[in-house]
Image (cartoon, rainbow, N blue to C red):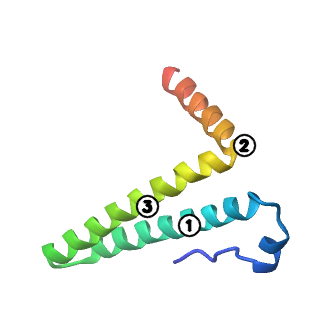
C-alpha cells in the first residue's frame, strides 16, 4: 500500500521561505520509502531471477535517492539533526546494556 502524500499546496504557499522546502523534502522521502518497499515486495514475488534482480537493483537506486533526500533534510531541518543524534544515543545505550 502506498502512502497518501500529505500535500496541501495552499499550506505550502503560506509557509516561510525554508519551510516549504522541508515539507517537499519530506514528501520526497515518503515517496522513496514507498518505492523501496514496493520494489522489494515485487522482487520477493518474482519467479524469474532476472526480474527479481532488476527489481532489487531499482530498489537499491531508490535507497540512494532516499539518502540524497535525507542529506537535504539534515541541512534544512536543524531539529531533525538533534532528534537523530538523540535517537542514535538511545540506541547506543541499549546496545551497551
Horizontally, residue 19 falls left or right of residue 57, namely right
Residue situated in front as seen by the camera: 5 or 67: 67
Q: Helix, strand, or loop for circle 1?
A: helix
Q: Position of residue 27 (x, y in %)?
A: 61, 68
Q: Position of residue 4 (x, y in %)?
A: 63, 77
Q: Position of residue 18 (x, y in %)?
A: 74, 57
Mark 1 and mark 2: Cα distance apart in space: 18 Å
Q: Can you name the residue that lies furthest to the front here?
A: 17
Is 73 above or below relative to 6?
Answer: above
Q: Can you name the residue that lies furthest to the top here?
A: 96
Q: Position of residue 45 (x, y in %)?
A: 28, 76
Q: Which residue is mark 2?
A: 79
Is 74 above or below relative to 16?
Answer: above
Is 75 above or below relative to 41?
Answer: above
Q: Residues within 10 Å of mark 1 (few under 14, many from 20)?
A: some
Horizontally, residue 6 falls left or right of residue 48, namely right
Q: Residue at x 57, y 24 (%)?
A: 93
Horizontally, residue 30 falls left or right of residue 64, namely right
Q: Helix, strand, or loop for circle 3?
A: helix
Q: Which residue is mark 3?
A: 65
Residues tagged 3 and 1 counted as in contact (Cβ below 8 A): yes
Q: Residue at x 64, y 40 (%)?
A: 81
Q: Can you name the residue that lies furthest to the right here?
A: 14
Mark nearer the N terminus (2 vs 3): 3
Is 69 above or below relative to 94?
Answer: below
Mark nearer the N terminus (1 vs 2): 1
Q: Residues within 10 Å of mark 3 (few under 14, many from 20)?
A: some
Q: Which residue is mark 1?
A: 28
Amino acid at each position: 500500500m502506498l502512502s497518501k502524500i500529505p500535500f496541501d499546496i495552499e499550506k505550502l504557499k503560506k509557509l516561510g521561505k525554508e519551510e516549504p522546502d522541508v515539507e517537499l523534502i519530506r514528501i520526497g522521502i515518503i515517496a522513496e520509502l514507498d518505492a523501496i518497499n514496493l520494489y522489494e515486495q515485487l522482487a520477493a514475488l518474482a519467479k524469474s531471477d532476472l526480474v527479481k534482480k532488476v527489481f532489487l537493483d531499482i530498489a537499491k537506486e531508490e535507497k540512494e535517492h532516499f539518502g540524497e533526500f535525507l542529506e537535504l533534510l539534515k541541512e534544512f531541518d536543524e531539529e531533525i539533526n538533534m532528534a537523530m543524534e538523540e535517537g542514535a544515543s538511545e540506541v547506543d545505550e541499549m546496545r551497551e546494556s
